[in-house]
Image: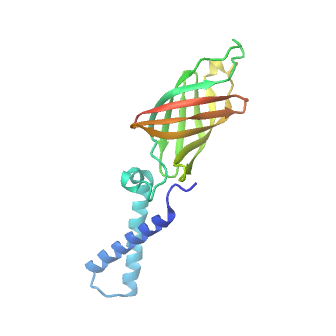
Amino acid sequence: MNVIKWKNALYLILGIATIVSLINWALSDKLFTLQFVIDCIGKSASVITISTWLFCYTLWKLPIFKNWLVLIPDLQGLWEGEIKSDWIDPIENIQKSPIACNLLIHQSLFKTCCRIETKESVSMSAMANFSINSDSRTCKIIFTYQNDPKQTIQNRSPIHFGTTVLDYAVKENERTLSGYYWTNRKTTGELNFKFVEKY
């Protein structure tokens, strides 16, 4: 999906180019020549390139850009929660109790990385994307991952792959991510997280 409104982004880029050109005009000898046009293009390209880099990695998170330009939420930080799985331990032949876990999200405007840590394994996203429905005002983050259990337990829990779908919500200033997952070892489960802190 689009993470920004490209039409508004284009207007913003044209606005920056216009401001740079006006400043260049004010500081020049005010002669409209080919050299002046080339100079404006060069300076505008430099300012836009630097601004775009800063925007994609940092500035996009500012509230001033929310909704009219940036469509996705800033989820970067530490989330704490638990996993409820229908997986049956093949050795003990029992279904495990809910597992405490942490979700760590690293995010720039065009790239999101998710890492889920438990006492026994680490799941690292290979691909992550957002699904936003403006009509119902819902936001989901969807990612595929590889789960790497500790070497000492891979006899009962081998490396496997899965997909997670989490709904993002804000209620009474509490930010949550909740949803479900499924894996290639034919297991499913639920995940629930609460936001703890940014890093």
Q: Please say if 144 is above or below 51.
A: above
Is residue 19 rendered to the left or right of residue 128? Answer: left
What colouring method underlies this structural image?
rainbow
Q: Position of residue 19 (x, y in %)?
A: 34, 72
Q: Position of residue 172 (x, y in %)?
A: 40, 36
Residue at point 48% right, 35% down?
176
Which quadrant: the N terminus? bottom right
Q: Is residue 199 visible?
A: no
Is residue 36 rendered to the left or right of residue 158? Answer: left
Q: Position of residue 50 (x, y in %)?
A: 40, 61
Q: Please say if 132 is above or below 22.
A: above
Q: Which quadrant of the structure image shows residue 154?
A: top right
Q: Is residue 138 visible?
A: yes
Is residue 121 rendered to the left or right of residue 157? Answer: left
Is residue 65 rendered to the left or right of residue 111? Answer: left
Q: Please say if 140 is above or below 26.
A: above
Residue at point 41% right, 73% down?
42
Q: How many marks?
A: 0
Q: Position of residue 134 (x, y in %)?
A: 53, 53
Residue at point 37% right, 74% down?
18
Question: Viewer-proximal residue, 199 or 31?
Answer: 199
